[in-house]
Amino acid sequence: MLDATRPDVMVEFTHAAACMEAAPLAAARGIHMVLGASGLNAEQLQSLDTMSREHGIGVIVAPNFALGAVVLKKLAEQAAAFFDYVDVVEAHHEMKIDAPSGFSLAIARGMREERGRDFERNQTEIHHLDETRGGDIGGVGIHSMRLPGRSAHHEVVFGAGGQTLSIRHDTLGRDCYMPGVLRCVREVGNRPGLTVGLETVLGL
């Protein structure tokens, strides 16, 4: 298909394994890439960076293309310095095959990086049901729900003495992704190498 259509940009929104199979095929043909695949890890990002430099192309990887979601991530990173406890709750439709979402992982990693150290996390002594405390990245608890009627929802909940702070974004329709996707498609050719995050493209 790539040989037949000869595109300037390939947009790929599947999952990490499929993305890493498609990316070398596009890179070898000098095709820029906008990637929204869920769950890309640090090793895979490094591979994409190397690939982009070897072939002289631009690659943009964004866990989320919704402007509101990107603002949520930025606000959460700014708040991270002021709280010792935080959890991320994400909910998606029942057909999503991975958990947690790639964007929830990006939020957790971004907060941990901005804070510069792990968050505090309650160490539960008695578990009546395994895994009810969720996953843990740098002290950030991550909890995933998969339900019909959901699209994509992320909430960051900070806790401190006598108070909590919640920051939430709800995707109500997939049309919210298109402005971000189109912005990346237009700019990827002017950004050689790897760019991570829509916030980087927008200059947030």
Image (tube, rainbow, N blue to C red):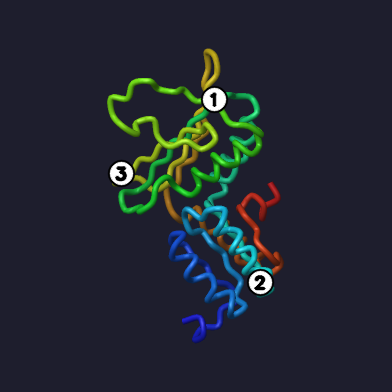
Residue located 48% across and 49% down the image: 102
List the residue tagged with mark 2.
57
Identify which residue, 161 or 72, lies in the foreground: 161
- On the picture, is 117 further left or further right than 128? right
In the image, what residue type sits under mark 3?
Leu
- Which badge, 3 or 1, is on the more N-terminal residue? 1
| x and y percentages locating residue 191 in the rendered image | 70, 64
- On the picture, is 199 further left or further right than 122? right
| x and y percentages locating residue 131 in the rendered image | 34, 34
List the residue tagged with mark 3.
147
In the image, what residue type sits under mark 1?
Glu
| x and y percentages locating residue 69 in the rendered image | 54, 44
Residue 196 in view (yes/no): yes
Residue located 49% across and 71% down the image: 22
CA–CA distance in space, label 2 to label 1? 41 Å
Considering only vertical position in the picture, is 19 above or below 89? below
In the image, what residue type sits under mark 2?
Ile
Considering only vertical position in the picture, is 126 above or below 62? above
Identify which residue, 156 or 117, lies in the foreground: 117
Identify which residue, 171 or 46, lies in the foreground: 46
Considering only vertical position in the picture, is 130 above or below 161? below
List the residue tagged with mark 1.
120
